[in-house]
Amino acid sequence: MNKVDAESDGWAKLQGRNTKNLRIWTGAWLVSLALANFGPKFLWDHHSSLSLSSIVVNVALGIGMIVANGRLLNGLDEMQRQIQIEAMAVALGVGLVFGLAYSTLDVVNLISFDAEISHLVMLVAVVFMVTVALGLRRVR
Amino acid sequence: MKNSLKVLRAQRDWTQAELAAAVDVSRQTINAIEKGKFDPSLPLAFRFARLFETTIEEIFEDRST
C-alpha cells in the first residue's frame, strides 16, 4: 500500500491546502470588512475615496474567498461534497424564507427594532453548521 | 445498497484508512459505504472494482433484488 499511501497523502495535503487557503481568504475578507465599516470613522475621517477603496478591496477579497470555497468544495470527496451542498441548500432556503419574513415584520412595523442583515448572516451560518453536523451524524 | 467492501478489505488485511487512500476518499466515506449509509457514485464503484480486481456486481448488490 506504499504507492497508495503516497497518493492519499497528496489528496489529504490538497484538502489541507484548500482549507488553509479558505481560512486565509476568509480572515482577510473579515479584516477588510471591519476596515470598510470602521475605517471612515476611526482612521480616515470619512474621506470618500478611501472609503470607496476599502469597499472595493473588501469585494475583491470576498471574490477570492468565494473562489477558495469553490476549490475546497471541489477537493472534497463525493460524500463530503453531498453533505456540504445539502447544508448550503438548506441554509439558502432558510435564509431566503426567514430573511424575507423577518424583513416583512420590519416593513409592517410588527417589530420595534430594525431588521439587520447581520441577523440574517448569523441565521444562515448557524443553519449551515447545524445541517453539516446532522449530515455527518447521519452517515456515521 | 448492500456491499461486500468490508469482507474484501478484511481479506487483504487493509484498514479503512488504507482503502480510503487507495480510492481517494475519506475514511468516513468508506465507513459510511460499508455500513450502507452512503451509496457511491459509478466512478467510485469502478475504482473499487479495479482495486479488488473484480466486477461492480460482485461488490455491490441492489437491496431491491
Image (cartoon, rainbow, N blue to C red):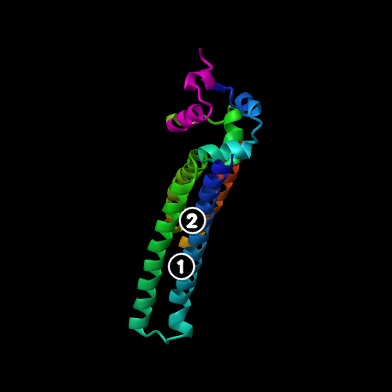
Is residue A5 depicted above or below B51 in this figure?
Answer: below
Residue B21 visible, this orientation: yes
Closer to us: A105 or A123: A123
Q: Residue furthest bottom?
A: A45
Q: Quadrant of the C terminus of chain A?
A: top right
Question: Which residue is pictured at 45% across the width and 70% down the height?
Answer: A33
Task: Find disc 1 in the rendering and name its residue.
Answer: A29
Mark 1: which amino acid? Trp
Q: Is residue B20 left or right of residue A81?
A: right
Of label 1 and label 2, which has the lower sequence position? 2
Magenta segment, which residues? B43-65
Q: Position of residue A61 (x, y in %)?
A: 41, 67
Residue A103, picture quadrant: bottom left
Image disc number at residue A18: 2
Residue sitting nearer the eye, A114 or A119: A119
In the rendered image, residue B48 lying in the magenta stretch gets the answer yes
Q: What percent of the width, then of the height, locates residue A15?
A: 51, 52
Residue that appears at 55% across and 41% down? A4
> Which dot, 1 or 2, sits closer to the camera?
2
Taking A23 as reference, is B52 above or below it?
A: above
For the image, the number of numbered tags is 2
> Which mark, by number, is residue B5?
none
Secondary element at tag 2: helix
Residue type (three-letter) at the residue carrying disc 2: Asn
In the picture shown, does residue A78 fall above or below A100? Answer: above
Would residue B63 be counted in the magenta stretch? yes
Q: Chain of mark 1?
A: A
Whether residue A115 is visible to the viewer of this picture, yes or no, is no
Q: Is residue A130 left or right of residue A40?
A: right
Question: In percent of the image, x 63 and y 27: which residue is there?
Answer: B6
